[in-house]
Amino acid sequence: MERALVIGASGGIGSAIVSELGARGVVVDGLSRSCDGLDVTDETSVARALGALSAPYDLVFVATGALEIGGHTPEKAIREVTPEALLAQFRVNALGPMMVLKHALPLLPRDSRAVFAALSARVGSIGDNAIGGWHSYRTAKAALNQLIHGASIELKRSHKQAIAVCLHPGTVETPFTAKYAGRHKTVPAPQAAANLVNVIESLTPAQTGGFFDYAGREIPW
């Protein structure tokens, strides 16, 4: 891996990914809302930002996401679900990464290995959901998983060595998770980044379209 693009590069996991890749000798470009005005929910913003970059990138990593949006917290009951929260979650956690993939296609090499990785979450797994709740966030992450899986099928027709995956980083010690970690074991962002980069480096084209955790284990849909 020689060049990488990290979307959401100023966030807790995104900045750690930038540092980890740099430590491994990868040339990294980073884009974020706070530093570059990139709004992944606005296709015009995504097209403008990615259109200004030069190909190729061996890795495009999307580290954007949100658990609370517009004051809406994860629901504990059906009666708490609102249209506003559902749509906001979908825009940030599903639509955003898909718009990045759409406009990153010209940046991916057609004749060599390339990885497109988006941060998902285990709670987006339908098969692994045994406790309910967090309806909007779960649904948005499940939608992201479907979008990337479907896109991977099309992508391998034109980019035969490309790998498009969703990754679960575990519960990372960032402001994103501080209120919700509870009794879950957490991992510092630098360690989470190292774990994720290790997984990315180990992936093969046969695994494109998959959903993997920080140890490279496949997560059920």
Image (cartoon, rainbow, N blue to C red):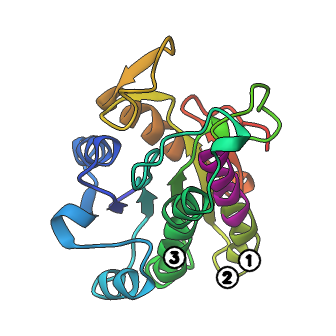
Residue 58: x and y in percent read: 43, 64
What span is in magenta?
135-147
Which one is nearer the viewer's eye here, 190 or 121? 121
Residue 125 in the magenta stretch? The answer is no
Q: Secondary structure at mark 3?
A: helix
Q: Vertical placement of 199 versus 44: above or below?
A: above
Quadrant where the image shows the C terminus: top right
Circle 3 residue: 99
Q: Vertical placement of 59 versus 121: above or below?
A: below
Which one is nearer the viewer's eye here, 73 or 48? 73
Mark 3 or mark 2: whose residue is earlier in sequence: 3
Q: In the rendered view, does 66 fall on the left or right side of 146?
A: left
Quadrant where the image shows the N terminus: bottom left
Tell me the kind of residue under disc 1. Glu
**Cα distance, mark 3 to mark 2?**
18 Å
Circle 2 residue: 158
